[in-house]
Amino acid sequence: MNTPQNRNASTGDSQLTIAKLINDAQADKSIKVILLHGGKYFSSGNNLSALTNAGTDKEHVKSFGGRGIFDCMNPYLRAINDSIKPVVSVVRGGALGIGFTTLSHVDFVFCGPDAHFMTPFMKTFQSPEGGSTMMFPQLMGKRMASEVLMLDKTMTAKEAVACGFANSIIPELETEPEWFDALKIPQIKKLLSTDYTTLTNCKRIMNAAKDHKKFEETLEIEGHGLLNSWLDEHFNGKLITYMQKLASQKAQRAKL
């Protein structure tokens, strides 16, 4: 992900691009590991400006939002979830919203010391997405998942490792440039040294053990829940007010 000007905000087009790259990599034997990262800031989540720009016409919002969820976001998540190549994420800075929920479908999460994770669904008047209502309780436990999803808790890198959501913190990432040498992460180096057939066979078997039916049901339920939140007659106004407040706070901090 490489749009640092908006902290790698996710869009339908970027999700489809990543999904295609992952899907195309499946049959390519020269590719053993898929690395997903965003330089010094993993992702600020879905581009909220696109939602406010969609306006208040319900038919337009329904069409625009439905495409974004069912034609872009869900295929993107399926590509990650179904990959027979290990998907490794390296998180520096923030992983917000879909940037956070995406991580529940990858195989490894390595963090820089400054990594932090948040799904601001409550403060942005939305509902959970990305399969998070299924995956978060499984990965981090119900109590932590409830705080993250219902209280907009910001989870630190240390907390992510402690609850089992992330593998480890890589201290060296703190001083690495925007684009870093992934081989400095020893686990990635070890994955690349593993026999291709043995590794992909292991991943296929692990994929077969997943509850694919429940995963699809969760994406469907979450998708309609999210779309319904966008269709609420007060949603656009409340989101604009929230974003204006954020902009004001940012301007105030810039003056300090």
Image (cartoon, rainbow, N blue to C red):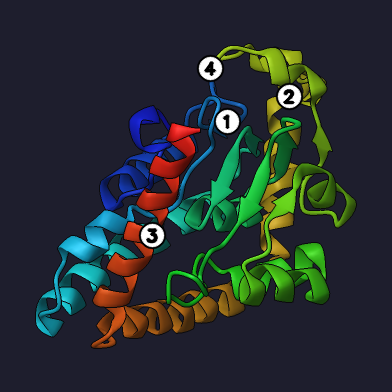
Residue denoted by label 4: 178
CA gap between label 2 and label 3 equals 41 Å
x, y percent for residue 196:
68, 27
Quadrant of the image containing the N terminus: top left
Q: Residues within 10 Å of mark 1 (few under 14, many from 20)?
A: some
Q: Is residue 158 left or right of residue 115?
A: right
Res. 205 visible in picture? no
Residue at 44% over, 43% down: 252
Q: Are marks 2 and 3 in contact (CB under 8 Å)?
A: no
Q: Are marks 1 and 2 in contact (CB under 8 Å)?
A: yes
Amino acid tagged 2: Ile
Q: Residues within 10 Å of mark 2 (few under 14, many from 20)?
A: some
Name the amino acid, label 3: Lys
Q: Secondary structure at mark 1?
A: strand
Query: Within 10 angstroms of label 4, few (less than 14), some, or many (20 or more) residues?
Result: few
Q: Nearer the viewer, mark 1 or mark 3?
A: 3
Residue at image x 47%, y 51%? Answer: 79
Marked residue nearer the N-terminal end (3 or 4): 4
In this rendering, position of residue 2 left or right of residue 190 = left
Disc 2/disc 4 C-alpha distance (Å): 18 Å
Give the residue type that dot 4 points to.
Glu
Disc nearer the start of the sequence (2/4) = 4
Q: Which mark is residue 35?
A: 1
Using the image, determine if residue 232 lies above or below residue 27: below
Return the residue at label 3: 245
Q: Residues within 10 Å of mark 3 (few under 14, many from 20)?
A: few
Q: Where does the image place residue 238, in percent across and percent down from the top left?
A: 32, 75
Q: Quadrant of residue 168?
A: top right
Q: CA distance from mark 1 to mark 4?
A: 15 Å
| Mark 1 residue type | Leu
